[in-house]
Amino acid sequence: MKLFRVLDPFTLTLIAVVLLASFFPARGSFVPFIEGLTTAAIALLFFMHGAKLSREAIIAGGCHWRLHLWVMCSTFILFPILGVLFAWWAPVNVDPALYTGFLYLCILPATVQSAIAFTSLAGGNVAAAVCSASASSLLGIFVSPLLVGLLMNMHGAEGNLEQVGKICLQLLLPFVLGHLSRPWTGDFVARNKKWIGKTDQTSILLVVYSAFGEAVVNGIWHKVGIGSLLFIALVSIVLLAIVIAVNTFAARKFGFNKADEITIVFCGSKKSLANGIPMANILFPTSVIGMMVLPLMIFHQIQLMVCAVMARRYKRETEKLAQEETRAAKA
C-alpha cells in the first residue's frame, strides 16, 4: 500500500499500460490503427502547444542559445562519452552486443514528443523544449550516423531526408498551424488548459503502448535471460541517474531558472526509440538488430517511468513557487 501512495496516478497508469501491452499487444490490423491514433495524438499535442504559445514566447525559446547548447552537449557529447567508457570497462560478462547496444543508445538524438510533454506537465519552458528537442531530433538524423561510423567502426551511415520530412510533417507542421490559428483558438486553449495536460499524458501512454507492444510481438524478451534483462535495467537506471544529476547540477550552476532547468533535464536526458529503431535497421545487419536495440527499448521505458515521477514533483515545486510569487506581489 505504501508503494501506491508514493506513486502518482499517472505513473500507475503507465505501469498498467506496460502490462496491457505485454499481454495484449497490438497485432494485425490493429497495429496501423494504434500507429495512426498515436500520430494524431502527437499532432494534436503540437497543434495545441502552437496555439498556446505567443510569438514572443516562441522567439524567446528559440533564442535561448545557452539552453540549447547545453542540451546538445548532453545529447551528443556527455551521453557518448559515458557510452564509450562503459563499453571499454565492460564490467560484467554478457553478450558483447549488449555493450555495443548501450553505445548505440548513447549516440542517438533526444525524443521529441515525450520530452516536450513532460516539460509541459512539469511547468517548464515549453517553447524552448519544442525548439531544443526538435533540433536534437533533426540533427541526430545526421550526427548520430556519423558518431556510429566514428565510435563503432560502421560505414555507410548517411542522413535520411525522408526522416527529416517525416519529423517536419508530424511535429513542426502541426505546431506552426496551431500557432497560426491563435487568433481563433488561442482563447479557447487558454481557458481549457487541462486539455493540454490530458493530451500530453495521452500521447505518452500511446507511445509506451505502441513501443512496448512492438517489442513483445517481435519476441525480443525471449532472446535473452533474466540476468541480462536485469543487467540492462540496472545500467539504464545508473546511466539515466548520472545524466539527470549532471544536467540538474549544470542548470543550477549556470544560473538557469526553474523552468529552464526542467527543460534541460527532460530534453537532455532522453533518447529516441522512434529514431533509434529505423536507424538501426539501416546501419546494422538484421542478425544483430534485436540485441542492439534491446538496451534502447528498456532504457526508453525506464526514462518514461522516471520522468513521469520527476514531472509530478517538478509540477508541485513550480505551483508552490507560483503561489509564493503571487503572495509576494499582493503583499
Image: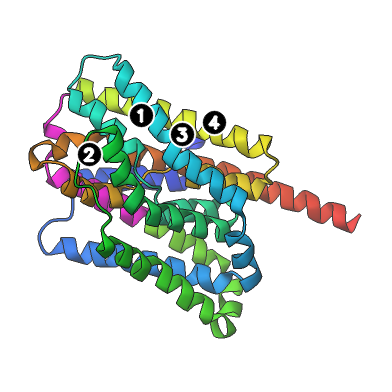
Q: Tag 2, which secondary structure?
A: helix
User: Which stretch is magenta?
Assistant: 204-225
Residue for point 58% across, 41% down: 313
Pointer 2 or 1: first along the chain:
1
Frontmost of labels 2 and 1 is 1
Q: Is residue 257 magenta?
A: no
> Amino acid under label 2?
Val
Pointer 3 or 1: first along the chain:
3
| Residues at marks 3 and 4, CA–CA distance in whole angstroms | 12 Å
* Residue highlighted by disc 4: 245
> Amino acid under label 1?
Gly
Residue for point 21% across, 45% down: 280
Count of numbered circles in the view = 4
| Residues at marks 2 and 4, CA–CA distance in whole angstroms | 25 Å
Occupied quadrant, residue 85: top left
Q: Residue furthest right?
A: 331
> Amino acid under label 3?
Leu
Sort mark 4 into few (<14), some (14-19) or many (20+) by Cα contacts within 10 Å: few
* Residue highlighted by disc 3: 78
Classify residue 207 as left or right of residue 135.
left
Q: Main secondary structure of the magenta part?
A: helix
**Quadrant location of the N terminus?**
top left
